[in-house]
Amino acid sequence: MPIIKSAKKRVRQTEVRYARNLATKRTMRDKIKLVKAAAESGDSKNISKLLSQAQSAIDTAAKKNVIHKNKASRAKSKLNTLAKNAAPAKKKAPATKTAKKPATTKKKPATVKKKVSAAKKTTKK
């Protein structure tokens, strides 16, 4: 335990800040877990709402310097990918195969070369 008055104050401040940061981090983790659970269960209706809440919690934690901004960006990207892959894919109509016509070789028409006159007449004034 510190003896100096300013050091005692620092200990008190650290305890308060630690508790505040812990609450922010816990909120962020809980929101992320909810998104992951919704993605696993395939709850596509609820996932977009949970995703926006989780992104908000991540941004808040980054703004308060509880986590680094790069970690926040990485976590948001990971959640977006998870949510995108969890959404049920729309089924496309099966493509019908059409028989391809055999390739025909077309002959290019013969090109006519223009005769170039050897000497052009120049006129003097």
Image (cartoon, helix red, strand yellow):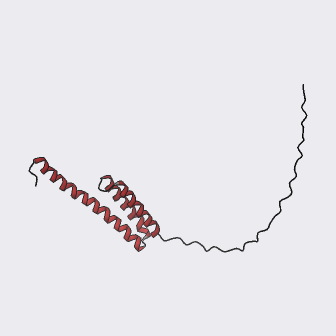
- Picture quadrant of residue 23: bottom left
The single residue placed furthest to the front in the displayed view is: 118
Near-viewer residue (46 or 12):
12
User: Which image quarter is the C terminus in?
Assistant: top right
- Picture quadrant of residue 53: bottom left
Q: Residue at x 13, y 49 (%)?
A: 7
In the image: residue 65, left or right of residue 51: left
Near-viewer residue (70 or 33):
70
The percent position of residue 37, horizontal first and vertical second, equals 37, 71
Q: Residue at x 67, y 74 (%)?
A: 97
- Picture quadrant of residue 52: bottom left
The percent position of residue 87, horizontal first and vertical second, equals 47, 69
Q: Residue at x 36, y 58 (%)?
A: 71
User: Which image quarter is the N terminus in?
Assistant: bottom left
Is residue 121 positioned above or below 3 on the image? above
In the image: residue 69, left or right of residue 2: right
In the image: residue 89, left or right of residue 25: right
The percent position of residue 34, horizontal first and vertical second, equals 35, 68
Q: Residue at x 83, y 62 (%)?
A: 107
The percent position of residue 47, horizontal first and vertical second, equals 41, 67
In the image: residue 15, left or right of residue 116: left
The single residue placed furthest to the left in the displayed view is: 3
